[in-house]
Image: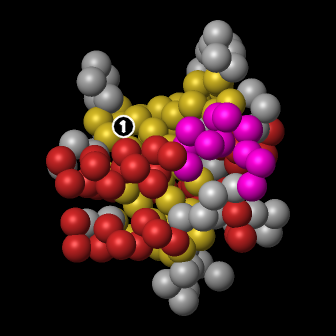
Amino acid sequence: MTFKPDRLTPRTLHRVSAITRTANAPWWAQDVEDFLLVGAPNLVLARTGSVLLIVDDDDVIVAVAAHQRHVKFNAELLQAFLVLPEHRGKGRAVEALGCTLKSIHASAGVEFIMWLVHEENIYMQKASQKAGGQQAGSVDDMGFLAYAEP
C-alpha cells in the first residue's frame, strides 16, 4: 500500500468530516483533533497554512496534517498530525508521517520542519524518529518534546 498527499482546498473542506475523534483521548490528543476539525480548515480558508490529507491507494484518508510557515525560521511548523483511529496499530504512522514530511519539503522549500510530540505519546515519538525526525531539546513545561527533520 502506498500513500500520497492530497492538499485540502476550500472546495474539499467537506473531507475534514472524515476525521473521527478518539474515545477517551488524553487532553493533548483532544487538542490535536480539535485543531484539525476547527482550526485547520480556517488555515485553508485564510490561506495562512495548509492541510494535507494522507490517502491510500483507494483514496481513503489515513492521516491528516496541518502546517504553516514558522514566523522566525526558514522552517515549516507541523502543527498537527493525526493517524485516524481506525488506521492505528497497523504500522501506517511512519509511512504517513514520511509522506507528510516529503510533501511539505517539496511544497514549502524550507530548510527543516519542526513539530511537537507529547511525552506520553510514545507511538508518535517512535514514528517521528523512524521518519527521520530528531529530538531537539528537552521536555517543555507542558510535557512536549520538539522534533526537527532537515
Q: Residue furthest bottom?
A: 58
Image point 22% across, 73% down: which residue?
11
Report if residue 131 is visible in the image: yes
Is 145 or 80 nearer to us in this picture? 80
What secondary structure predominates along the stretch shown in magenta? helix
* Percent coordinates x, y for residue 69 in the rendering: 29, 36
Q: Is residue 113 left or right of residue 96?
A: left
Image point 64% across, 17% down: which residue?
142
Q: Quadrant of residue 135?
A: top right
**Residue 105 falls within the magenta-colored stretch:** no
Which segment is the magenta one?
A: 23-33
Q: Quadrant of residue 89?
A: bottom right
Image point 41% across, 73% down: which residue?
15
**Residue 30 falls within the magenta-colored stretch:** yes
Q: Which residue is mark 1?
A: 76
Q: Is residue 143 left or right of residue 64?
A: right
Of helix, strand and loop, which one carries label 1? Answer: strand
* Percent coordinates x, y for residue 60 in the rendering: 54, 81
Is 22 or 103 nearer to us in this picture? 22
Look at the picture and state if 79 lies above or below 42. above
Q: Quadrant of residue 125?
A: top right
Image point 43% across, 66% down: which residue?
16
Colouring scheme applied when the structure was drawn: secondary structure
Quarter of the image with the N terminus in it: bottom right
* Percent coordinates x, y for residue 5 in the rendering: 43, 68
Q: Is residue 137 left or right of residue 13?
A: right
Q: Residue furthest left?
A: 46
Q: How many other residues sit within 10 Å of disc 1, few (<14), some (14-19) or many (≥20)?
A: many
Q: Amino acid at mark 1?
A: Glu
Look at the picture and state if 143 lies above or below 149. above
Q: How many marks can you see? A: 1
